[in-house]
């Protein structure tokens, strides 16, 4: 089991300590595609998976989800969250065992999802269908007086849409202060995604690197080379890799990403689980 760099009370203490430094923003990797962003005392939680629901669900099947990295924190301990987002309906990005206790601990939080997924999400989180705010690709919304969130299409593996033309898989650009953060969700390379990102100057791009291998029998993602190339294409100031070191059947080491980033002269940061990145 990979140990988290910071977890539980140590992680919480670091989040509190970081709040005293408001010269920039702070970002923590919580595992898989989950991130916490702190800006001027506000907290945005992206695609959190903070349970063992998938390990339990698939334990007696031919596709076991064996956890590789220890859980950084129980979701109910994150009782200061203003906004939480989900990029799509797969459980490692929309986990009832994470979100239900998280919402109980944060009754005033706002939940952002793809508009196409509203009914599915409401059922999974056991909440009223009007509770989550549904965005479609191209939509924008400003929340907590600080965060503007823009919907970006994602392809996992296709640019799948509902009958109304709303994307079922999405990424988001999060803007706050002078910063723009792109979290792609799960995606492959598509020109429509590049076109949607063209208006933005991306400071940090958070991109999956686990690749697209049909033998895994799950939808795929960018691989390391593609993630670096996408970062270069959108002129991201920094690329952070994600979606690895969670389940043994669906992971890669970040070494190839580091090599590709160095070769392509793409600024990057590889985080350990629970580690903080401060951007000023």
Image (cartoon, rainbow, N blue to C red):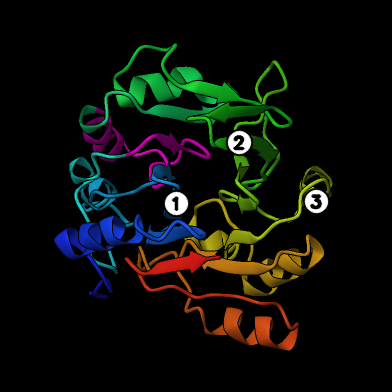
Disc 2, SS: strand
Disc 1, SS: strand
When the figure is inspected, residue 265 is found, relative to residue 97, above or below; the finding is below
Residue 95 % position (x, y): 33, 39
Which residue is found at the position 40% from the left and 43% from the top? 43
Q: Is residue 7 left or right of residue 108?
A: left
Proximity of marks 3 and 2: CB atoms separated by less than 8 Å: no
Residue behind mark 1: 37
Q: Nearer the viewer, mark 3 or mark 1?
A: 1
Q: Residues within 10 Å of mark 3 (few under 14, many from 20)?
A: some
Measure the alpha-carbon separation of dots 3 and 1: 24 Å
Residue behind mark 3: 194
Q: Nearer the viewer, mark 3 or mark 2?
A: 2
Q: Is residue 209 visible?
A: no
Q: Is residue 132 visible?
A: yes
Magenta segment boundaries in residue numbering: 81-103
Q: Is residue 133 left or right of residue 239?
A: left
Which residue is found at the position 56% from the left and 48% from the top? 185
Q: Is residue 98 left or right of residue 137?
A: left
Disc 3, SS: helix
Measure the alpha-carbon separation of dots 3 and 2: 17 Å
Which residue is found at the position 44% from the left and 41% from the top? 90
Residue behind mark 2: 149
- Does the magenta run of residues contain 264? no
Q: Residues within 10 Å of mark 2 (few under 14, many from 20)?
A: many
**Of callouts 3 and 1, which one flags the residue occurring earlier in the amino acid sequence?**
1
């Amino acid at each position: 089991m990979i140990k988290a760099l910071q977890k539980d009370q140590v992680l919480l203490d670091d989040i509190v300590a970081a709040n005293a430094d408001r010269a920039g923003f702070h970002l923590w990797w919580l595992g898989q595609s989950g991130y916490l962003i702190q800006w001027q005392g506000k907290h945005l939680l992206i695609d959190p998976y903070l349970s063992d629901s998938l390990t339990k669900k698939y334990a007696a099947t031919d596709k076991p989800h064996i956890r590789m990295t220890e859980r950084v924190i129980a979701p109910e301990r994150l009782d200061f969250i203003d906004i939480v987002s989900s990029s799509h309906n797969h459980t490692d990005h929309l986990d009832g065992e994470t979100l239900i206790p998280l919402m109980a601990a944060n009754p005033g939080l706002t939940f952002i999802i793809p508009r196409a997924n509203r009914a599915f999400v409401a059922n999974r989180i056991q909440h009223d269908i009007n509770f989550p705010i549904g965005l479609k690709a191209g939509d924008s919304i400003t929340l907590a007086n600080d965060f503007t969130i823009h919907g970006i299409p994602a392809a996992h593996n296709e640019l799948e849409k509902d009958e109304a033309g709303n994307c079922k898989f999405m990424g988001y650009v999060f803007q706050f202060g002078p910063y723009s953060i792109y979290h792609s969700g799960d995606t492959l390379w598509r020109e429509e995604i590049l076109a949607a990102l063209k208006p933005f100057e991306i400071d940090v791009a958070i991109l999956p690197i686990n690749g697209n291998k049909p033998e895994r029998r799950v939808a795929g993602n960018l691989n390391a080379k593609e993630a670096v190339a996408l970062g270069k294409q959108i002129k991201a100031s920094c690329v952070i890799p994600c979606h690895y070191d969670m389940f043994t059947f669906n992971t890669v080491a970040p070494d190839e990403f580091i090599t590709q980033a160095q070769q392509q002269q793409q600024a990057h940061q590889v985080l350990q689980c629970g580690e903080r990145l401060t951007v000023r």
